[in-house]
Image: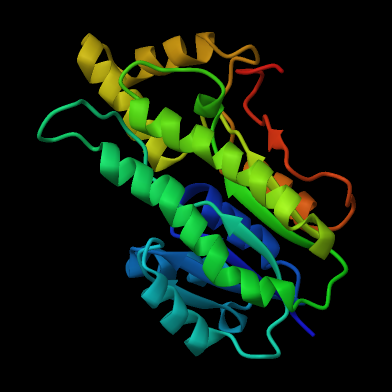
Amino acid sequence: MKKAYVITGAGSGMGRATAVLLSQNPNTKLLLVGRNKTALEQTLSLLHQPENHALAALDIRDAHAWKAALAEHFNDNTNLCGIFANAGIGGENHYGPEDRWEEIISINLTGTYVTIMELLPYLRKSADDFKHIVITSSCLARFGVPNYTGYCTAKTGLLGLTRSLSVQLASEHILVNALCPGWVETEMAKAGIQKLADRGGESYAAEFERQMSYVPLGRISQPEEIAAMVAFLFSNQQTSMTGQGIDINNGSFMQ
């Protein structure tokens, strides 16, 4: 029986890299989820044997959309072994009429919660001894950044969700962990650096170097590095880790 995995935010960045890596195992079936169908189709085209996998373009906050997608792509024999709850948005928010607070909180935090709750019944039926939920948090759950009140709050909330679910689901051998990446070379990160560059009247290259100077290893992570961590957590090579925020951020935060 194939092992099924759901990846949200699969249209780009860490989600896409994870899908590409997991698809190398012919015993894997992926459901790629995101809002942009074209981006999901591009990811699907990069996968090993793309005909073995599927996509669903939906808003992760929409429980009804989830139910429809799962009714279409899953059945009683689907062996869902892992969820990579990775979808989210970034950027600043500023109090006032154009404040993005509600959007950032609802997509990053509520959307992740809805994702997991809608998929949980399928995960519980898995034939695997251990099942996995991996949530994308951020190093900004560890420390504050000016003007990122919504993002910092949402990503910190995801660590609370991780801890609560890990205890709640432990007796069912469902392991729940979060990743806390720092700068990862994605379009969202590039847009963030560009905005900082524009504000300071600097070039992208100069602002990039400034941001890397704050990182102990002085480098930006690649999406494939995050994908490798997700694959490891899904692999059952270890089954003792749950409720953890894993700092995969080049030393940006040290516990």
Quadrant, the C terminus: top right
Quadrant, the N terminus: bottom right
**Where is residue 54 drawn, in percent x and y?**
52, 79
Q: Is residue 185 visible?
A: no
**Where is residue 43 drawn, in percent x and y?**
48, 64
In this rendering, the answer to whether 128 lies above or below 246 is below
Q: Is residue 235 visible?
A: yes
Residue at 43% from the left image edge and 55% from the top image edge: 111
180 or 40: nearer the viewer: 180
Q: Is residue 62 left or right of residue 72?
A: left
**Where is residue 120 drawn, in percent x and y?**
63, 69
Locate residue 19: give its quadrant. bottom right
Q: Is residue 164 left or right of residue 237?
A: left
Locate residue 36: give its quadrant. bottom left
The number of discs equals 0
**Where is residue 59 drawn, in percent x and y?**
35, 64
In this rendering, the answer to whether 163 lies above or below 216 is below
Residue at 54% from the left image edge and 41% from the top image edge: 158
Residue at 49% from the left image edge and 54% from the top image edge: 112
Locate residue 61: give its quadrant. bottom left
219 or 153: nearer the viewer: 153
Q: Is the image coloured rainbow, by chain, by secondary structure, or in one colour?
A: rainbow
Residue at 63% from the left image edge and 78% from the top image edge: 49
In this rendering, the answer to whether 45 lies above or below 207 is below
